[in-house]
Amino acid sequence: MFSAFLKVGLLKDMLCLFDEDKREFYTLITLGDNVCGHPQITHGGMTAAIIDETLGGINYVLKRYGVVNHGPSFTVHLEVDYKAPLPAGGHVLCHASLESTEGRKAWVRAEVLPHPGGAPYALGRALFVIPRDKVAPASAAAGDGAAADHGAAAENGNAAVAVPAGNGDAAQETECGLERLASLSPRARRDG
């Protein structure tokens, strides 16, 4: 969904990162101006989509590490608590982490924060479930080549996940620390 948002300008830029040590997922987003429900305020549905997509991102990466079961999973429950209006056109950071797993189920949580810091705009929690007939053995996901090689992470344990650039080209995989999020956005890599 993020790719579609980039193509139509709802998002100006984005970058996804996974911290291997903490097993946390981060999406840095520059919101477009046409995301408003009320003047200059991001529509709550867009905020929920940012949370859902980021939670899907951590769920996907954790499958690669064998932390959650392998196989296609679906959001079957999504909770969003809106804490403050999210301004349109600004930078936000969605931070996601694993809460718990049980068989085919994974509970994950997220918070949408101003970048570079402050109180959350929204908190989210979701349940992802793999259908019974789709659970795959752990070895099957290791060979699919669909995700970035996280073994080549930077010394600080952070690895970037490749994200499509706004023009439809695949962004280059980048090793970096989380403090360098803004300078390594897909647009900066395209233009630099």
Image (tube, grey):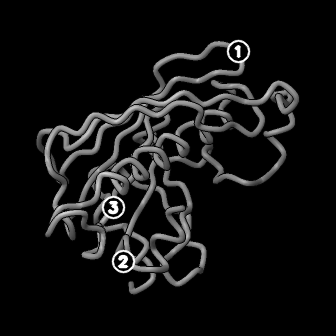
Query: Which is more N-terminal, label 2 or label 1?
Result: 1
Spatial separation of the CA atoms under disc 3 and disc 2: 13 Å
Q: Residue at x 36, y 77 (%)?
A: 188
Frontmost residue, 159 versus 185: 185
Left or right, residue 152 beside residue 142: left
Quadrant in the picture for residue 171: bottom right
Q: Residue at x 67, y 34 (%)?
A: 63
Frontmost residue, 137 versus 127: 127
Give SS at disc 1: loop
Amino acid type of the residue that numbered disc 1 sits on in the rendered structure:
Gly
Name the front one of labels 1 and 2: 1
Identity of the residue furthest to the front in this view: 38
Q: Position of residue 89 (x, y in %)?
A: 21, 70
Q: Position of residue 128 (x, y in %)?
A: 60, 31
Q: Quadrant of the C terminus?
A: bottom left
Q: Residue at x 47, y 56 (%)?
A: 175
Label placed on residue 103: 1
Left or right, residue 143 beside residue 68: right
Question: Are there few (<14), some (14-19), or many (20+) residues within 10 Å of tag 2?
Answer: few
Query: Which is more N-terminal, label 3 or label 1?
Result: 3
Q: Position of residue 54 (x, y in %)?
A: 46, 46
Question: Are there few (<14), some (14-19), or many (20+) residues within 10 Å of tag 3?
Answer: many
Q: Quadrant of the N terminus?
A: bottom right
Give SS at disc 3: strand
Query: Which is more N-terminal, label 2 or label 3?
Result: 3
- Name above or below for residue 36 compared with residue 140: below
The residue that mark 3 highlights is 29
Quadrant in the picture for residue 33: bottom left
Q: Does the residue at mark 1 contact the one at mark 3 (Cβ under 8 Å)?
A: no
